Structure formats: structure tokens, C-alpha cells
Amino acid sequence: AGALLLSATLFFTAPSAKAELNKFEYNAGGEFGNGTAEQYGEADIKGKKFDNMDLRRSNFTSADARDCSFKNSKLVGAYFIKTVLARADMQGADLSDVLMDRAVLVDANLKNTILARAVLTRSDLTGAKIEGADFTNALVDRTQQLALCRYAEGQNPVTGADTRKSLG
């Protein structure tokens, strides 16, 4: 009975500990003090400019980010699950380790982006500009991979990776 009482006490004190942890994470400004870890989940941010920003580990899940600009931004580890990024300009952005499951990237500008280890499952990249993009170890659906390989060209200016080879 004593162990049960102790575990129940820990269960009920956990929310305040969680609130303190969230407060610490908020004040730290992202993971280990790197990035902003901003929250844009389900937001209507159409046309907003995020150029040259540090948005590592930020959350854009289910956001409407059509025509947004993320030129040369750091988006490492960001979440773009079910995000609409049609015609978004992500030229030169670092999108390493992003989760873009079911993202809509129709006609997006991904020129010279780094998408190393990105997860792009069930995402739509129709008409995306990928010249110089680095897809090294990215998870891309086979149909999207084949479609992108038809016109993949260039070399990423930062990593040196050949776009076509990085797509496999």
C-alpha cells in the first residue's frame, strides 16, 4: 500500500514538474538553447517572411504556409506535418532532420536547400524546384523520388552533395 501511495503521489505532482520543465525549455529558447522552437501549429501564416531566421525545432504542423518565405533559414528538426507550403520559398534553408509527413510542397522553391535525413513521406513535391538540393539519407516516397529524379540537377553549395545522387 505504501508503494501505491508513493506512486500516486508522484503521479499527482508530475504536472507541476512538467510545467517547470516547459518553463525552462521556453526560457532556454529551443533544444539546448539553440533555435527558437516557435509554435505555428494550425496557424494561418500565408505569405509571412521567415528569411534568415533561426527556427530550429519549431512547429508548423497543419499550418497554412502558402507563399511563405524561409530563405536561408535554419529549420533543423522542425515539424511540417500536414503543412501546406505551396509556392513557399525555402531557397538555401537548412531543413536537415525535418519531419514533413504529408506536407504539400507544390511549386515550392527548394533550390540549394539541405534536406539531409528529412522525412518527406506521403508529401507532394509536384513542380518543386530542387536544383542544388541535398536529399542525403532523406526518406522520400518512391513515386516522388522517381518524379524528382527526372529533373534533378546541381550540387548543393554548402554540403557539396549532387542532387540527383542524393535522391538515390
Image (cartoon, rainbow, N blue to C red):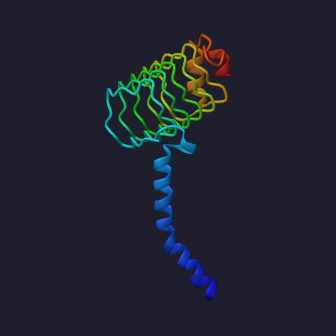
Residue 27, compared with residue 81, is above or below; it is below
Classify residue 133 as left or right of residue 79: right
The spot of residue 84 in percent (x, y) is 40, 32
Q: State which quadrant residue 83 falls in.
A: top left
Quadrant location of the C terminus?
Answer: top right
Q: What residue sits 61% from the left and 28% below the top?
A: 142
The spot of residue 89 in percent (x, y) is 42, 21
The spot of residue 45 in percent (x, y) is 33, 33
Total marks placed: 0
The residue lying toward the viewer, choosing from 130 and 31, is: 31
The residue lying toward the viewer, choosing from 55 and 34, is: 34
Quadrant location of the N terminus?
Answer: bottom right
Classify residue 116 as left or right of residue 100: right
Residue 72, compared with residue 103, is above or below; it is above
Classify residue 86 as left or right of residue 11: left
The residue lying toward the viewer, choosing from 122 and 159, is: 159
The spot of residue 96 in percent (x, y) is 58, 31
Q: What residue sits 51% from the left and 16% below the top?
A: 111
The residue lying toward the viewer, choosing from 66 and 91, is: 91
Q: What residue sits 48% from the left and 26% below the top?
A: 73
Which residue is farthest bottom? Answer: 1
Q: What residue sits 33% from the left and 28% below the top?
A: 48
